[in-house]
Image (cartoon, rainbow, N blue to C red):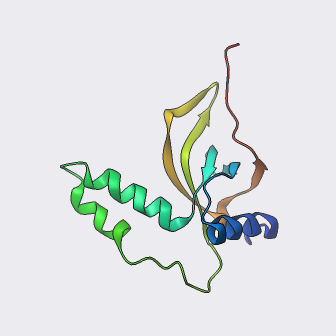
Amino acid sequence: MAHPDELLLAIAELVESEQSSQMSLTVVVPGAVITGRLAPEAMWKQRVAEVLRDSGQLRRFALPFAGPDAAGRDTRPTHLHFHLARILQGSYGIPDTGGMYRVALADVSAWTIGDIGYSDQ
């Protein structure tokens, strides 16, 4: 989308303002379908920083994610921050346990409420 969908932008603003990570969403972006739960940007950055700090080889990369929180900013969200998310590929979700993805709102071409999963049953 050249301009983000206003309804999707409103959802992103609510996730940010309520500091909630309970909203499940599935989006279509160039080359991928991503499904998972949205997280506020500050919460997402904190978790990424923790994962990087726990890695001996990647520890130094935690710094950009652990910087000052811009929670009080007056700008509208530009990205969706997914946690417990998977890239859907055929009948698989990659990774199985869920990952951390940052998606530009402007790149979302389609979306739906809910976390899409697969079952062999």
Residue in the image at 61% along x and 72% along y: 78
Q: Is the residue 2 above or below the residue 116 in the image? A: below
Residue in the image at 70% along x and 68% along y: 14
Residue 119 location in percent, x, y? 67, 20
Say left or right for 72 vs 50: right
Using the rendered view, name the quadrant where residue 45 is placed.
bottom left
Quadrant housing the N terminus: bottom right
Residue in the image at 69% along x and 58% along y: 108
For the residue pair 95 and 16, the one nearer the viewer reads as 16
Residue in the image at 61% along x and 86% along y: 74
Determine the residue located farthest toward the bottom in the rendered image.
74
Determine if residue 1 is in view: no
Determine if residue 64 is in view: yes
Residue 87 location in percent, x, y? 57, 40
Quadrant housing the C terminus: top right
Q: Is the residue 32 above or below the residue 69 in the image? A: above
Q: Is the residue 114 above or below the residue 70 in the image? A: above
Residue 51 location in percent, x, y? 34, 51
Determine the residue located farthest toward the right in the rendered image.
7
For the residue pair 12 and 89, the one nearer the viewer reads as 12
